[in-house]
Amino acid sequence: MTARQDVYDAVDARRDEVVTFLSEFLRIETENPPGRNYREGAAFLGNALAERGYDVEYVEVPEAVVERHYPDRTAYERVNVLGRKSFGDGPNVHFTGHYDVVPAGADWTRDPFAAQLESGRLYGRGASDMKSGIAASLLAIDALEAAGIEFGGSITQSMTVDEETGGFTGLGYLVREGHLDDTDYCVYTECFDSSRVCLGHRGVLKFRVVAHGRKAHGCMAQDGTNAISAMSDFLTRVEEHREELHRRTTDLPVIPEGSRRADISATMVDAGYSENVVPDRCTATFYRVLVPDESVADARNEIRERIAETEANVGASLDYEEIMFAEPTSVPRDCEVSQTYARNVAAFHGEAEFVISPGSDDQRFVVNDAGVEECIVYGPGLLDQAHVADEYVPVEEVLTAAKVMAVSTAELVGDLTR
Ligand SMILES: [Zn+2]
């Protein structure tokens, strides 16, 4: 029997155990927004780590930091969990995942927090995005140990909050506090299907523009400055800008293919008091997407230039208010962690598909802020199950991803050749 097969068998032997663990985990309603039940989620995960012999640390986010990012949600506690296990000197492999889930929403045909197993699929909010990723990385290391694989270095597992609302008080906070400084390889276990190795993501800039005019009665409109007209001028410039952005394409493997370009969308518009009042205020929000090699600073400047053009053209003033940004991120496909995972994915799927995410996620904190280039996204959840009603994860996917994680870890810091 090869060591590799021993590891696979050790994963399969834990099938019932991982279903039980994931079911209990799915029943904890960690919906974000607003960020409910994090204390309970953290305790559940901390216990799971402690039972496995990890040193556990709970990283609580101070209220002042929460207030900076989520001023209306300071009533909710933010608790991140870190577990570390050392097997000797050598590289530190860090698995990280978020345990917040998007609100269940309507349209479910089953209870989103009951964790029902049916035909090999486990249903529940967060099943794919991404409590199964956390379950898989824990299982991977359990299986390595059970199979008696020797490895040097250390394993860190972190479980964080608030990814669904930007990650600043989750993985962003762990990075800022230095918890990833000694990371050699990082695997962010977000949902991209067990056949894909994700190398990065596009960037995002969310902002609001407020046009200020002067109120007047509709029958004496000449006395006012219509904020809707001002916004209309700006929206026209945004549409022109959009065409220009569509010509900024990328050769990187962003999925779906239609997303291999920069983009901007107006997403909300709000104005007006009554049909007979010229409004003095119009607000619009925008979603600007950046391809890798664009920067948020440049994107912001391009918007400010267009704001200035509108102001000069219509004689109203427009304010720019930033909501959130995430710089684009990508790591080379020939980095060691990516090649190691791709090789092991190939054993199950023929060939690994390298992809770049169309949206943004927490990987940017690790690559851009902690400076860890050896960082990929790899996990069992199905991408098309993220945020949908009746979300599920196939149990087989969790096992396959855990096998890939286990043997890849052994190749990175251990010895699979005995
Ligand atoms: Zn996610």
Image (tube, helix red, strand yellow):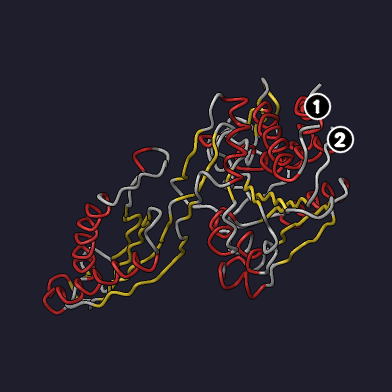
Q: For disc 2, does the CB lie below 8 Å from ligand 1?
A: no
Q: Which quadrant, please, contains the N terminus?
A: top right
User: Which corner quadrant of the image does residue 226 belong to?
Assistant: bottom left
Residue displayed at 53% across by 43% down: 198
Mark 1 lies on residue: 6
Above or below, 93 against 61 in this view is above
Side (left or right) of 230 relative to 152? left
Q: Which mark is residue 148?
A: 2
What is the spatial separation of the Cα atoms under label 2 and label 1, in whole angstroms? 9 Å
Q: How busy is the neighbourhood of tag 2: few (under 14 within 10 Å), some, or many (20 plus)?
A: few
SS for tag 1? Answer: helix
Identify the residue at image location x=68%, y=22%: 120
Query: In the picture, residue 386 is in which quadrant?
Result: top right
User: Residue 45 placed where, x, y %?
Assistant: 78, 49
313 vs 219, nearest the viewer: 313
Are dots 2 and 1 in contact, CB under 8 Å? yes
Mark 2 or mark 1, which has the lower sequence index? 1
Q: Between residues 347 and 113, which one lies in front from this camera angle?
A: 347
**Element assignment for label 2:** loop
Q: Residue at x 38, y 54 (%)?
A: 289
Residue 170 horizontal side relative to residue 311, left or right: right
